Image (cartoon, helix red, strand yellow):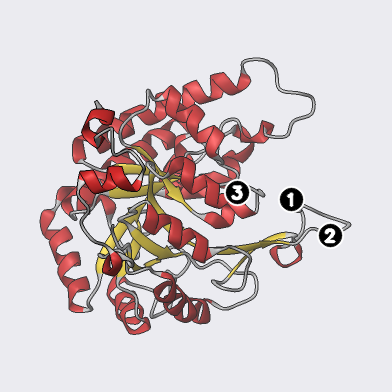
Amino acid sequence: MITLKGPSLHLAQFSADQPPFDSLPNIARWAAHMGFKALQIPAWDKRLFDVELAASSQAYCDDITAMLAEHGLVISELTTHLFGQLVAVHPAYDALCDSFAPAHLQGDAAARSAWAVHQLTCAAIASRRLGLSDMGTFSGALAWPYVFPFPQRPDGLVETAFAELARRWLPVLDTCAEQGINLCFEIHPAEDLHDGASFELFLEHVGHHPRCKMLFDPSHLILQQLDYLAFIDHYRDYIRMFHVKDAEFLPTGKQGLFGGYQPWLKRAARFRSLGDGQVDFKGIFSKLAEYDYSGWATLEWECCLKNQHDGAREGVAFINRHIIQVTDTVFDDFAGTPVAPAVIARMLGLEGNPVGELQR
């Protein structure tokens, strides 16, 4: 059995232009003081990390590793969500996603997507240089606008979308394979890979690529009213990254799952700081321990009420409290005793049929 690692901190919701969140050394000092053991670095945020330089310079990667080590930290993973989002953008989201790309590429969907694939390639190489094994991302979305359609979807729309999605992602998956990196798609509403069934459909279209894995975040599953504990049972062999994030679903007589026109504070489905929502983390950590999940437990702070400093401070204690230090003994071994085959046969009333003969 394996004890998972943690707590790590996803930096995407913390980086800012003001200290201590304005540079990786500053945020590392703050995170270490909070009690984190690792940082999950968003590869798109140049305030913290230069992904192209990391792909070309081992010295740059070694310097980052050494700086973090001075604070007792390591990198848990790189994340590439905004790059992944640009791999496949439905035209309805073009204007909103343009800001994820450099200004000279905005308005050119093909060039923007090609740039994103290059950035993902750099991130895979950088992950290898940093000694990592897993990288998180989004799938992007071609079919999502039709998830609950009227008029109904025409035959072939979903299949065509997933065939194209696979075509765009296969070169990235192959690059990850060359670099020894697992590409972990976060299962997330607004992405084409938003639940287990859509992940399986994508997996089929990429030929069950061995580097196609999953980032598990229960908050996105509880908001879909999906059984997130059974989800672990189904996909334990694919889960390589874990975002520890809480959420709650509080339907009313006026709104339910699709409460998206309301601000976050007023939605029936909303994110909360760890321990303030409805996610059964005792069940999740127990499942992950049972299935020998060997990766990191990474705090992702998103909350419509609590500030990020309290969310981080409380999150460290919450994750430490839930990590199960797995046992290396069986609790009832004290009562065990060796028993000969003949005695076993007698215990079962099989004296005339030796155990070995029955097995043959």
Mark 3 lies on a secondary structure that is loop
Q: Amino acid at mark 1?
A: Leu
Q: Is residue 9 visible?
A: yes
Q: Earlier in the sequence, mark 3 or mark 2?
A: 3
Rendered residue at 75%/49% (across/down) = 258
Q: Earlier in the sequence, mark 1 or mark 2?
A: 2
Mark 1 lies on a secondary structure that is loop
> Which residue, given by chain and number where applicable, does mark 3 sit on?
227
| Vertical position of residue 225 compared to residue 318: above or below | above
In this rendering, would 87 be left or right of 272? left
Mark 2 lies on a secondary structure that is loop
User: Residue 257, labelled with which disc?
Assistant: 1
Count residues near mark 3 (Cα–Cα under 10 Å), then give few for <14, some for 14-19, many for 20+. Answer: few
Q: CA distance from mark 3 to mark 1?
A: 15 Å
Residue 181 versus residue 261: which sits nearer the camera? 181
| Vertical position of residue 318 compared to residue 243: above or below | below
Is mark 3 in CB contact (under 8 Å) with mark 1?
Answer: no
Residue 299 versus residue 339: which sits nearer the camera? 339
> Which residue, given by chain and number where applicable, does mark 2 sit on?
252
Count residues near mark 2 (Cα–Cα under 10 Å), then give few for <14, some for 14-19, many for 20+. Answer: few
The residue positioned farthest toward the front in the image shown: 352
Q: Quadrant of residue 69?
A: bottom left
Q: Amino acid at mark 3?
A: Asp
Q: CA distance from mark 3 to mark 2?
A: 21 Å
Rendered residue at 59%/63% (across/down) = 279
